[in-house]
Image (spheres, rainbow, N blue to C red):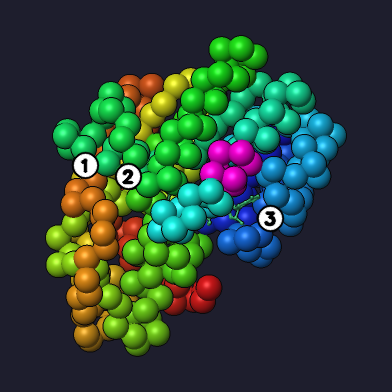
């Protein structure tokens, strides 16, 4: 099949593109390289450097005629979305709508969307949190993801586009940027390996659901092959505190001194963890990578590759 991966030069998108190529698909990557890296794109994939909202992107879609879109491109900083909601919406809502409309015109039949679990449920009442929990995003970034899920419903109902929104938990693994504010595994690995002391915001007891990028790739490709439709959480159902992550990464990096503590980040949820039973029932997906193995592999990657 011909598969277009938006954001395919980024962390998750590049792993997806590699897995699609390994499965024998023809892959095109649409990425403006704002946070992505050209060297993450395999030479056998076609790279189009363009904004998802641009006429160049729309005309590429019209010309290349993909069978499916894996929409991963986004402005990913939650903090920046709070500082500048309008910019976040211009990329994450308007850019997504422009790309979906271009896909509709080009008769793309199948779309898989990188949504969020971590930023969707706010202070969830149920943990691990199922999809039935009311969506109460605490950031413009989460609002934009929810809005795009709504547009997917529209394109599906009115135009017959099959779509699946996968709400990822906190994804970690090789190629994640250590320069943002969210990828704590990448940030800790980078700082500890440089001999620096990272900062934990607050006391470090806040929990997240850390899922390895290889497990995300199996979930997305499983959903792609099975052509399931709807909204699905993708997470491990296991809560791990930021303090524990820091200690695991410190040990794997061989650093002597642990993190220091700084002020809490306002609006930071105390706990977050996803129930992925719907995806398990739908395609038999289970996370396979243990946290210990995943963190060791990620630290080893950062030791060999500096971003
Ligand atoms: P990333 O920053 O590594 O990847 C995003 C990619 O999109 C980058 O290559 C960037 O250059 C590209 N991009 C950004 N704006 C663009 C635009 N206007 N036009 C074209 N390309 C553009 O981030 P990631 O962690 O790989 O995230 C991938 C997707 O998964 C995003 O949609 C993100 O919101 C979602 N997600 C990530 C996580 C996580 O923990 N990493 C969790 C939930 C959801």
**Beta carbon of the mark 3 residue lies under 8 A of ligand 1:** yes
Residue tagged 1: 123
Compared to residue 125, the image places residue 301 above or below, namely: below
Does the residue at mark 1 contact the one at mark 2 (Cβ under 8 Å)?
Answer: yes
Q: Is residue 207 magenta?
A: no
Identified at 34% across, 85% down, the residue is 196
What range of the chain is rendered magenta? 89-95
Identified at 81% across, 44% down, the residue is 56
Identify the image quadrant of residue 55.
Answer: top right
Q: Is residue 94 magenta?
A: yes
Identify the image quadrant of residue 262.
Answer: bottom left
Whether residue 166 is visible, yes or no, is no
**Where does the image place residue 20, in percent across and percent down from the top left?**
61, 41
Crowding near the residue tagged with mark 2, few <14, some 14–19, many ≥20 C-alpha atoms within 10 Å: some
**Which one is in front, 127 or 278?**
127
Residue tagged 2: 138
Decide which of tag 1 and tag 2 comes sooner along the chain: 1
Q: Is residue 241 left or right of residue 304?
A: left
**Which one is in front, 107 or 133?**
133
Residue tagged 3: 32
Q: CA distance from mark 1 to mark 2?
A: 9 Å
Q: CA distance from mark 3 to mark 2?
A: 27 Å
**Which one is in front, 290 or 126?**
126
Identified at 40% across, 85% down, the residue is 194
Decide which of tag 3 and tag 1 comes sooner along the chain: 3
**Beta carbon of the mark 2 residue lies under 8 A of ligand 1:** no
**Where does the image place residue 233, in percent across and percent down from the top left?**
35, 34
**Where does the image place residue 87, in percent across and percent down from the top left?**
56, 51
Whether residue 177 is visible, yes or no, is yes
């Amino acid at each position: 099949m011909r598969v277009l991966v938006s954001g395919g030069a980024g962390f998750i998108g590049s792993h997806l593109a590699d897995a699609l190529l390994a499965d024998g698909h023809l892959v095109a990557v649409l990425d403006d390289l704002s946070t992505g890296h050209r060297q993450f794109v395999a030479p056998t994939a076609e790279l189009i450097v363009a904004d998802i909202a641009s006429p160049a992107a729309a005309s590429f879609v019209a010309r290349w005629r993909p069978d499916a879109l894996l929409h991963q491109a986004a402005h990913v900083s939650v903090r920046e979305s709070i500082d500048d909601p309008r910019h976040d919406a211009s990329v994450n809502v308007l850019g997504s709508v422009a790309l979906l409309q271009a896909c509709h015109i080009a008769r793309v039949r199948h779309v898989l969307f990188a949504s969020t679990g971590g930023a969707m449920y706010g202070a969830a009442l149920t943990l691990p949190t199922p999809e039935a929990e009311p969506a109460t995003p605490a950031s413009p970034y989460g609002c934009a993801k929810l809005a795009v899920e709504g547009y997917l419903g529209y394109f599906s109902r009115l135009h017959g586009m099959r779509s699946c929104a996968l709400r990822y938990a906190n994804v970690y693994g090789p190629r994640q940027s250590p320069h943002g504010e969210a990828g704590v595994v990448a940030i800790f690995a980078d700082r500890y390996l440089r001999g620096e002391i990272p900062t934990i915001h607050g006391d470090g007891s806040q929990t997240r659901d850390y899922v390895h990028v290889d497990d995300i790739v199996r979930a997305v490709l499983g959903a792609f092959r099975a052509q399931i439709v709807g909204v699905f959480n993708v997470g491990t159902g296991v809560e791990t505190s930021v303090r524990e992550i820091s200690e695991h990464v410190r040990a794997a990096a061989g650093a002597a001194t642990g993190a220091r503590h700084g002020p809490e980040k306002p609006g930071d949820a105390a706990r977050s963890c996803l129930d992925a039973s719907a995806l398990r029932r739908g395609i038999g997906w289970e996370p396979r990578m243990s946290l210990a193995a995943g963190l060791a592999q990620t630290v080893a990657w950062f030791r060999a590759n500096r971003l």
